[in-house]
Image (cartoon, rainbow, N blue to C red):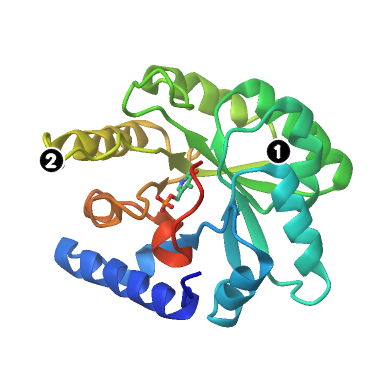
Amino acid sequence: MPVIDVAANLHRVRQEIDDACAAAGREPSEVRLLPVSKTHPPELLTAAYDAGARLLGENRVQEAAEKAEHFATERPDLRWAMIGHLQTNKARQVAGFADEFHALDSLKIARALHRALHEEDRTLDVFVQVNSSAEPQKFGLAPEEVPDVVGELAELSTLRVRGLMTVAVQRDAGTGDAPVAACFGRMVELRDALPEHLCGRELSMGMSGDLALAIAHGATTVRVGQAVFGARDSR
Ligand SMILES: *Cc1c(COP(=O)(O)O)cnc(C)c1O
């Protein structure tokens, strides 16, 4: 089994982020690295923590809840961002431990989260997921649905809308960067068209394969799995 040096990987990815910021004329402090630890065992998460990570991304509720419980006593300052589509019947569980939710894609899930958060006396930072590539297999709201949803979210006091999130189209050697860049460009346009008091200015976009391009377009959080923790079994 290959040994994964999580600390070295985090350092290298951070360097890549800083270089992308320099190239784009942006401040490195404007871009946050969210390491995505889904599928990986607690040892690798501990290595990330020891290297300074205090927020980790997960996409399956059961797995995330178990990890959160595992780390709660010894590393209580480790926080959790849920980055995957959520079913309504899991909202209560997520409301109990998550600090951020990057895949808000319906009012139904928003209301379920709000009810649970209200009872727990907690709040949740959320990013509204947009299907910027219009691929049918992708989660997220169509861009034209976003203004109405964001308007309704203002009624839900436990949810703090920090901005928008997307998973861009997969880069293809044949077509190059243009289709990916078009996804990121759509996100910027959409964000800029939304009133600031309803939707934060943040953009959660960019992954291991497209983070520099996302930063060039204004990403404020990049969600990076493989480049930090190594390859996953397919998912
Ligand atoms: C898994 C995942 C990531 C990280 O992807 P990598 O290619 O491993 O960097 C980012 N965002 C979401 C929504 C994911 O599910």
The secondary element bearing badge 2 is classed as loop
Residue 41 location in percent, x, y?
65, 63
| Residue matched to label 1 | 157
Indicate the amino acid at tag 2: Gly
Indicate the amino acid at tag 1: Ser
Labelled pair 2, 1 in contact (Cβ < 8 Å)? no
| Residue matched to label 2 | 176
Residue 36 location in percent, x, y?
52, 57
Residue 53 location in percent, x, y?
55, 72
As displayed, is residue 124 above or below residue 150?
below
- Front: mark 2 or 1: 2
Residue 27: in sight, yes or no?
A: no
What residue is rendered at 79% in x and 65% in y? 70
Q: Which mark is residue 70?
A: none
What residue is rendered at 43% in x and 73% in y? 10
- Give the camera-side residue of 158 and 195: 158
As displayed, is residue 126 above or below residue 69?
above
The secondary element bearing badge 1 is classed as loop
What residue is rendered at 56% in x and 59% in y? 37
- Give the camera-side residue of 198 and 78: 78
